[in-house]
């Protein structure tokens, strides 16, 4: 009977803001909003992808490799470690990583005491008009990971990863209790009539519902113009950051233009019981899933 009354509450937050192309002002904006999230009771605060500057992957430019920095002694990570320790919050920190001759789209997970728990490197790297990430980033080599923080065991993946159900399932199989996806997505430069926001959101709602876990997505807003080899390229980032509950329901959401600090509270013990009783992990058949290890469906 004691177990029936057990609770384990966590308050998660998603931030949303427009970036300039100045590192100090963007990091200051992130810190200001992390503090606002903390004031609202947040324990784990998600900042958007590559928030130190513009989303530079609109162009293939050699000079943009200068934006990368080594993981060790990274100044923004160090600043967020200090902030996390001061406030007692968990902060995943997205950054452009230089690792000798390799480059990664990476995220460091900072625990509530300021400890750096390690990094995840983005696994799925997109390549299309406006989102030319293969020019800059090697495919991540960490594999999908979970991190035991003070408040929850969390899975963190990055932007394009969010379109792959295998990534979400892999993290939850390893014990992730909440999934986090920092993002940079908006209009399509080659087709201004294409709006992916509803598709983007529904896919992640499906991850939450299929795995019976809450999910937090953070996206930037604002118009960014990058000079490319073919002239200026423009993306209007559509925000719509959100927090979904364990059946995929939207419990907090932002619009496409406004700076936002979203918060939501979940009882992880209650959700764990629901996940166990729903049977989607009990009834899995890994022996039948070998086809997922192929590219063309042929074993």
Image (spheres, helix red, strand yellow):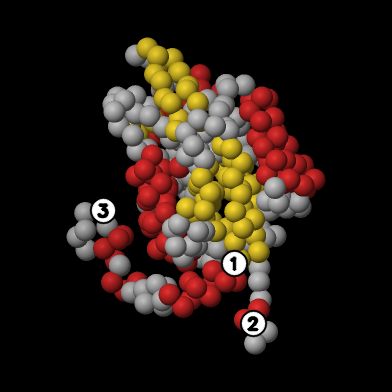
The mark nearer the N terminus, 1 or 2, is: 2
Residue 280 seen anywhere in this rendered image of the structure: yes
Seen at 53% across and 75% down, the residue is 273
Instruction: Give the secondary structure at mark 1.
Output: helix
The N terminus lies in which quarter of the figure?
bottom right
Q: Position of residue 243 (x, y in %)?
A: 52, 51
Q: CA distance from mark 2 to mark 3?
A: 45 Å
Q: Residue at label 2?
A: 3
Seen at 66% across and 68% down, the residue is 8
The mark nearer the N terminus, 2 or 3, is: 2
Describe residue 205's horizontal placement relative to residue 264 as left or right: left
Instruction: Give the secondary structure at mark 2.
Output: helix
Instruction: Give the secondary structure at mark 3.
Output: loop
Residue farthest bottom in this picture? 1
Q: Position of residue 170 (x, y in %)?
A: 44, 61
Query: How many residues crowd mark 3 within 10 Å: few (<14), some (14–19), many (20+)?
Result: few
Query: How many residues crowd mark 1 within 10 Å: few (<14), some (14–19), many (20+)?
Result: many
Q: What number is the disc on residue 104? A: none
Q: Residue at label 1?
A: 268
Q: Is residue 147 above or below residue 70?
A: below
Q: Position of residue 285 (x, y in %)?
A: 33, 74
Residue farthest right in this picture? 86
Q: CA distance from mark 1 to mark 2?
A: 13 Å
Seen at 47% across and 39% down, the residue is 240
Looking at the picture, tell me which residue is in the foreground, 86 or 269: 269
Q: Residue at label 3?
A: 295
Residue 217 seen anywhere in this rendered image of the structure: no
The C terminus lies in which quarter of the figure?
bottom left
The mark nearer the N terminus, 3 or 1, is: 1
Looking at the picture, tell me which residue is in the foreground, 262 or 191: 262
């Amino acid at each position: 009977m004691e177990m029936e009354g057990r609770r384990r509450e966590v308050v998660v937050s998603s931030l949303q803001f427009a970036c300039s192309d100045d590192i100090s002002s963007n990091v200051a904006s992130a810190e200001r909003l992390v503090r606002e999230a903390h004031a609202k009771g947040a324990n784990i605060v998600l900042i958007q992808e590559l928030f130190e500057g513009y989303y530079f992957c609109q162009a293939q430019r050699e000079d943009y490799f200068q934006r990368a920095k080594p993981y060790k002694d990274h100044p923004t990570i160090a600043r967020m470690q200090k902030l996390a320790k001061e406030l007692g919050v968990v902060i995943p920190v997205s950054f452009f990583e230089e690792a000798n001759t390799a480059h990664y789209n990476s995220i460091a997970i900072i625990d509530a005491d300021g400890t750096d728990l390690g990094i995840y490197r983005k696994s799925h790297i997109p390549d299309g008009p406006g989102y030319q990430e293969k020019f800059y980033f090697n495919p991540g080599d960490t594999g999908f990971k979970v991190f035991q923080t003070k408040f929850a065991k969390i899975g963190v993946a990055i932007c394009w990863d969010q379109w792959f159900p295998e990534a979400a399932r892999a993290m939850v199989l390893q014990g992730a209790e909440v999934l986090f996806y920092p993002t940079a997505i908006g209009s399509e430069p080659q087709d201004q009539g294409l709006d992916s926001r509803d598709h983007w959101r529904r896919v992640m709602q499906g991850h939450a519902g299929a795995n019976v876990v809450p999910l937090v997505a953070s996206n930037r807003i604002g118009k960014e113009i990058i000079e490319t080899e073919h002239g200026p390229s423009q993306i209007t980032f559509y925000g719509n950051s959100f927090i979904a509950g364990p059946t995929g329901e939207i419990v907090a959401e932002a619009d496409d233009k406004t700076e936002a600090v979203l918060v939501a509270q979940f009882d992880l013990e209650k959700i764990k019981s629901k996940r166990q009783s729903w049977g989607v992990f009990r009834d899995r058949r890994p022996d039948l899933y070998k086809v997922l290890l192929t590219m063309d469906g042929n074993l």
